[in-house]
Image (cartoon, rainbow, N blue to C red):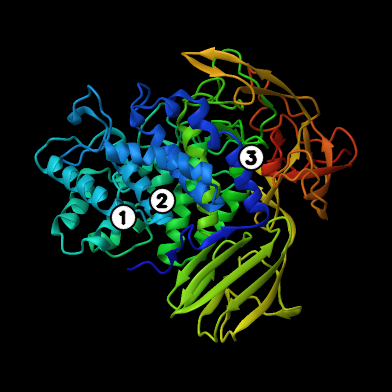
Amino acid sequence: MASVYQFLTSKEISPRGWIKRQLEIQAEGLCGNLDKVWPDVRDSQWIGGDREGWERVPYWLDGFIPLAYLLDDEDLKARAQRYVDHILAFQEADGWICPNGDTPRAEYDIWAVHLIAKVLTVYYDCTRDERIPEVLYRIWKNFYELLITDGITVRKWGQFRWFEGFIALIRLKEWYSDEAWIGDLAKRLKETGTNYDEYMESWKTPLHKWTLYTHVVNMAMMLKSEAVSCDLLGEAYTDLAERYYSLLMKYNGMPTGCFTGDECLSGLSPIQGTELCGVVELMYSFEWLYAHTGDKKWAERLETVAFNALPATISDDMWAHQYDQMSNQIDCNPMRGNPHFNTNNKDSHVFGLEPNYGCCTSNFGQGWPKLALSSFMRTRDGLLCAVPVPVSVSTEWKGVPVQVTLDTAYPFRNSFTYRVKAEKKTGMKLRIRIPSFVKELTVNGERVSKRNQLVFGGFEAGETVITVGYGFEAKLEARPYQLYTARYGSLLFALPISYEVKMKEYVREGVERKAPYCDYYYKGTSDWNYGYASRTLTVEERDGEDGIPFSSHAPSLVLHAELSHIDWGLLERFENVCAKVPRSRRALDGPQPMVLYPYGCAKLRMTELPIVKKNG
């Protein structure tokens, strides 16, 4: 089936409010400065240097380009264009574009071809650069010719990510609709790519070994494979993603909507982590799945991951990030001896420049910009608010200029003000997705029956104002091992752990860690061994004091709960990892009033807690 909704571009969407501030912090932090401080981007083979010439520059550009154009920042745009100009200038005569150097093409992992083609599609959407259609044509025609003559080999990452190139191929088919080879290439990619159905049984139990078929980032990307490929392949959409996602969550799910993977699927334990690349790629898959299907479950899941897992694993100033985040994370110092992670190193949970491995360093930047670009989508009869973050949309509906502006502090507040400005009366409809967890719904101050969507139309010339309000319930939700998490709307809450931070500056393998782009060790300094003494949760709205949307020091929304100490204990042979489950659930003292922070604000935290057994 054809996609139900269509993405808008940075030429139509402008960020406002907290999402704009989040993008500004990102631009001021690591993502906005990698080309200045990190050799794998600054000195990459992609721009004539001698550092990595595979995925890292494309990964970085995939977030840096939309960041630059959403903020309309001339310096950022000029730096993005410098990279793109160099990449285009050194495209070879036959269309090959990757800097494989002395590596024969047949031995070069062609995953980078898929990735750079996707990046150039993003660049075209932001700029409408007239060079891009021909460049992409030459890339893919060369790829096709090499594929049918065995000039390249589909293997490793390219085999497991065969569908990623379809994002560019879809656009190519729109530009060159008469080119039959595009459809043939699509079929060959699927035929030579991995069939994930063959590996589903291996997702049920952690293998404790590194494999491509349980790799968490592959799992996250895989979910959109049918959505991005079925139209070009001429196949029916079967909601394969739901079958995959349900299985992954049943056996590896986290309360954030992610599945564990440190680095491969790791089961249901709250002390197993998930990789930051997996977080942003999961968001991107959900964005495509919602656009293609119109099924609101994908948009709800997108909210949960974006508002919890993404901010949790990045420092407030976005100069440092983790490779792995854990639901129950009491310390972020390197582990002594062997790590408890399945296939990651002992420093994977440390906040830093490139803990464990540098893919997340370059890739995490796509998360917030692409969320902003998915906030509103085009429908057959107008516009849809898909994820209600504050943005302004400027577009046309049947020749009439229309602007739709949303002002909101959601997910920290539950009120929304939409302003629709039209130069003339227009038949455009504005649709607003309503989450399933909304308990009460108001429109312009009046309570209305709960529904999946609100639909407004018949806008007169001038400005129309629509106010919407949500009512939520704060509640505990059951997790495996008889543990519970606190949730309010799309936000997950955790008990924050106070901590001390030690800054580590050093050089390793020629890469300098120097403040602010160095490593930071977070050592917990407050008690964490608690359980819920009551199911009662109350909500408090606070004034954010530091201008950081997901502030770890001054969150603008908290929950109040009653907790009691319990004998939890540490994981055997570890001094800074809590046990998977508590040794005892018996209360050691009476209920104590405690404040829970949004999960994304609590860098050290206990998220999955038991309900305590009372004494006596």
> Depth-wise, is mark 3 or mark 2 nearer the camera?
3
> Depth-wise, is mark 3 or mark 1 nearer the camera?
1
Snapshot quadrant of residue 349: top right
Q: 47 or 360: which is nearer to us?
A: 47
Sequence-first disc among 3 and 2: 2
Q: Which residue is mark 3?
A: 312
Q: Which residue is mark 2?
A: 244
Q: Amino acid at mark 2?
A: Tyr
Q: Amino acid at mark 1?
A: Glu
Q: 414 or 60: which is nearer to us?
A: 60
Report the residue at 48% width, 47% height from top. 282
Secondary structure beneath dot 1 equals loop
Query: CA gap, disc 3 to disc 1?
Result: 39 Å
| Circles 1 and 2 in contact, beta carbons < 8 Å | no
Q: Is residue 251 visible?
A: no
Image quadrant containing the N terminus: bottom left
- Pinpoint residue 78: horizontal percent, then vertical percent: 46, 42
Sequence-first disc among 1 and 2: 1
Q: Amino acid at mark 3?
A: Ala
**Callout 1 crowding tier (Cα within 10 Å): few <14, some 14–19, many ≥20:** few
> Depth-wise, is mark 1 or mark 2 nearer the camera?
1
Query: CA gap, disc 1 to disc 2?
Result: 39 Å
Q: Which residue is mark 1?
A: 130
Vertical relation: 517 (above or below) 161: above
Secondary structure beneath dot 2 equals helix
Query: CA gap, disc 3 to disc 2?
Result: 25 Å
